Image: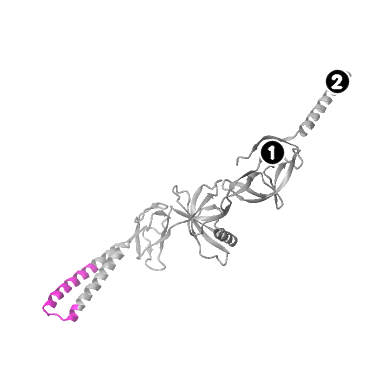
Amino acid sequence: MRLTVIICFSMLLAACIGKEQEAEQGWGRPLQATVISPEKRMVSEWDEYTGRFRAAQRVEIRARVSGYVDVVKFNDGQIVEEGDVLFVIDQQPFQILVDRATAVYEQTKREFERAEGLRKTRAISEDDYGQRLQDKQVAKAGYEEALLNLEWTEVKAPFTGRASRNYVDVGNLVSGGNASATLLTTIVSMAPVEFYFQGSESDVLKYIRLTASQQRPGERDQPWPVYVKLKDEDTFKHEGTVNFVDNEIDLNTGTKDVRATFANTDGLLEPGLFGRLRINATAPFEAMIIPEHIISTEQTRKYVYTLTPENTAQRSYITLGKLTGDGMRIVKSGLDPQDKVITGNLQMIQPGAQIEPVAETTSKL
């Protein structure tokens, strides 16, 4: 029995020692990681700005005449066409005024025609004839005004767009034709849609100097292509053009307003949406680029892991430029084309770690 216990203990001890040695051997193995060579190619730098979309056209719908709302002829949030009737003000009082003005106008026309006949025979004085002419003109103006007011009882959409909700219901008395006219609803156009953003004074100076050096077209000479991504998007897939740059820098904010327009044929870009805009900042130039995701930060310094001749990891501190159009990062200094940049297993790498390069290829960025 005693011998059996000794044998079992010896076997257990040997197994534990074997596992410990095996673990030590695994820990000491080089860490496998993919590496790439930085790529040099012709690139363009991009500036990014934040802003919001606005409707190219927006109008507050108010009546031109006062009265009681008789009919609401649209649904809340509906797309309305230019000329569609949205509200009808009670037309009966205005029709009565039209009938009255019509009668007065017809009477003054008959009196004027009679005066014309009398004038030929000199049976009427010139003063009386002039008075009949004036009465007819005043009556005609009153008639046309009454017709216009009757027409204005139908409140129409001035352009095609999406209406908001109706702010008044049938039976409400609304005021019209003055500065305090009742707001009935609002309409915004949907396509095209505009995007407003602001450039700082430094940005303005940079683009002025680029224009002066002919690296970019003049800011108002031709549209600049721009690209926007929405809050839930990863890529700048909405293409538009800058079509307006303000004529002065705001003294309060130190920025200049810029506007871009987007076709919005699918209706996705709604007024009020937040977006991030990217605009090409420079003419194409040759630069070294690396993937954005492999760059790490040490306080204020940026670095990547590179491979030494002894296949160990080291930190290479770099100076970065802007992003390229496909999301790669321009490296201004700190790397050479022959350097091997580590791109895999970055969360496990420490300076001095032994690396086993895997699938070493030239970067295809």
Q: Nearer the viewer, residue 107 or 344?
A: 344
Q: Residues within 10 Å of mark 1 (few under 14, many from 20)?
A: few
Horizontal side, residue 270 vs residue 282: left or right: left
Looking at the rendered structure, the kind of residue marked 1 is Asn
User: Is 324 within the magenta?
Assistant: no
- Residue pointed to by mark 1: 345
Residue 293, x across and y down, in percent = 64, 44
Looking at the rendered structure, the kind of residue marked 2 is Ile
Quadrant holding the C terminus: top right
- Residue pointed to by mark 2: 7
In the rendered image, the vertical position of residue 3 relative to residue 199, given as above or below: above
User: Is 105 within the magenta?
Assistant: yes
| SS type, badge 1 | loop
Q: Which residues are magenta?
A: 101-129
In the rendered image, the vertical position of residue 327 relative to residue 252, given as above or below: above
Tell me the CA gap for discs 2 and 1: 44 Å
Furthest residue in direction right, as rendered: 2
Q: Nearer the viewer, residue 4 or 364?
A: 364
| SS type, badge 2 | helix
